[in-house]
Image (spheres, grey):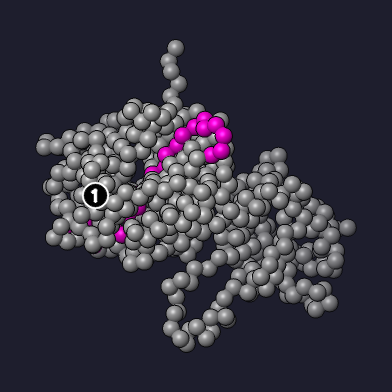
Amino acid sequence: ADKDAKFAPLGDALASLDAKLDGVLSEVVEDAGFKGGAGESKVVTLPSKYGVKKVALVGAGKKMDKGEVAAASAAKWGAAVAAVAKAEKATGAAVALGTDMPIAAVQAAVEAMVVGLAADERYKLRHEEAQKTAGDRALKLKSVELLGAPADAAAAIARAEKMANAVLLTKSLVASPANYLTPTALAETAKKISEGFDLSLKVLEREDCEKLGMGSYLGVSQGAVEPPKFIHLTYTPKGEVTKRIAYIGKGLTFDSGGYNIKAGAGSMIEKMKFDMGGAGAVLGAAQAVGALRPEGVEVHFIVAACENMVSEKAMRPGDILTASNDKTIEVINTDAEGRLTLADALVYAEKLGGGDSGKPALDAIVDVATLTGAIIIALGDKYAGVWASTDELASGLEAASKASGELIWRMPLAPEYGDELKSPIADLKNVGGRGGSSITAALFLKEFVKEAPWAHIDIAGTVWSDKEGGATGYGVRMLYQFVEDAPNTETRAAKAD
């Protein structure tokens, strides 16, 4: 009875299992000091008489009010389960979820398990001797059985697998080295998404972009051997369209910094393959939307893909570029290139609705970018910074952030810093001063959106984590959640009485 009491808060199933194992779980709690903290785990090898080689306790942390488990906590638990299974080289696993686990938590946990069990060895040990022992290194796990899940969890589990696959796509893109993931390869990925998940695709070549006057974007790409690719995927739902959204992902498949080359300690030039992390998140979200088919929302996924390289053709500090809205930009720093590509993408996106387009105006434009190192200093590697032109759009993104477990923090579109972008010879400079440089970057982007509700998400800190093994897949879940919530989300500023 005493042993059962220790596990009563976690449900009858665990107490019953403890009894069948002759109190082994109780002993782990008492002797090994297992507290059940989020991500904490203890593994016990069992005698053969039990028919199971090992049993692991993995903590989920404290439950939230009303029995809810936060998505972030559930995801951390699922990731810990996956880590234990991989470390123990399990060939099969049974995971007790608990009948009182909320559906949203079940989904988050299963997503994290699927993502955590994946291994990226695409570029590892390709020589002949390594191939002979590849089987020894491969993941042994063949099946995972979910025990005690809520009766209505089947749909959530299926949804979790689709979302996890989208996150894995993003992780694989962000982790890919630049000599493999070129702008052309990124466009090929978009084509696969289009064909596999029923999205329409348009890819603009350099000549097409020239005709549209995209001098800002093309100025960045002109120093590279690899040609630019302007990618536009569109998801059209069945039935009535009530909301229209455009996502724009920064797509620098490599950023050398240009003539203001990234150099010295802390420049992270060796990691600049992840400078297309915004594009990775947007393409992952495109796959998730295509797989899950939310109703009522038309979504555009846009990536101005290119490289920022050094050559005799590259843009120089002091050059003046003309964007597709005819604004001129004095290039003070060639390493502030992402905003130059996003500028033309923002102009392109807003023209998809309203004005002469013949279509309703867009309800939201959201750009996602690894834009500034300053946001890492401000918010670290757990929170992305968000700037929004309306409180309503900011609230919608915050709700999607909370539901998905991907953290954001709203930052100010401070007009007081606008003067820093003034140029004596052009309409704008591409950088302001060092102080508040994430804010001035957002203010620069705001110059390329006229009326549509717009938000900018700086994911420079959240896109990569050395502690977690590299690319995080950040952004996919939140972007999808915002689409799903869109029919009931207001994005435009309330009109004054």
Q: In this view, does 144 lie to the left or right of 279?
A: right
Residue kind at label 1, given as amino acid type: Glu
240 left or right of 437 in image:
right
Stretch of the chain drawn in magenta: 237-263
Residue at the location (43% across, 18% down)? 495
Hey, which residue is sitting farthest left in the picture? 425
**Is residue 137 rendered to the left or right of residue 431?**
right
Give the residue drawn at x 47%, y 87%: 129
Q: Residue furthest right?
A: 1
- Rendered location of residue 322, percent (x, y): 19, 41
- Residue at disc 1, secondary structure: helix
Quadrant of the snapshot with the C terminus: top left
| Residue at 34%, 34% in the rendered image | 351
Magenta segment includes 216 = no
Relative to 469, is 366 above or below?
Answer: above
- Would you place residue 346 above or below residue 79 in this image? above
Task: Characterize the local packing of mark 1: few (<14), some (14-19) or many (20 or more) Cα atoms within 10 angstroms.
Answer: few
Q: Mark 1 points at which residue?
A: 207
- Nearest the viewer among 407 and 115 is 115
State whether residue 478 is above or below residue 90.
above
Of 254 and 292, nearer the camera is 292
Q: Residue most toward the top? A: 497
Horizontal and vertical percent for residue 327?
20, 36
Does 245 lie within the magenta span? yes
**Residue drawn 13% across and 60% down?**
312
- Give the image location of residue 423, x and y in percent: 15, 37
Residue 334 appearing in the image: yes
Where's the N terminus, which quadrant? bottom right
Q: Residue 147 at what x, y percent from top left?
A: 76, 58
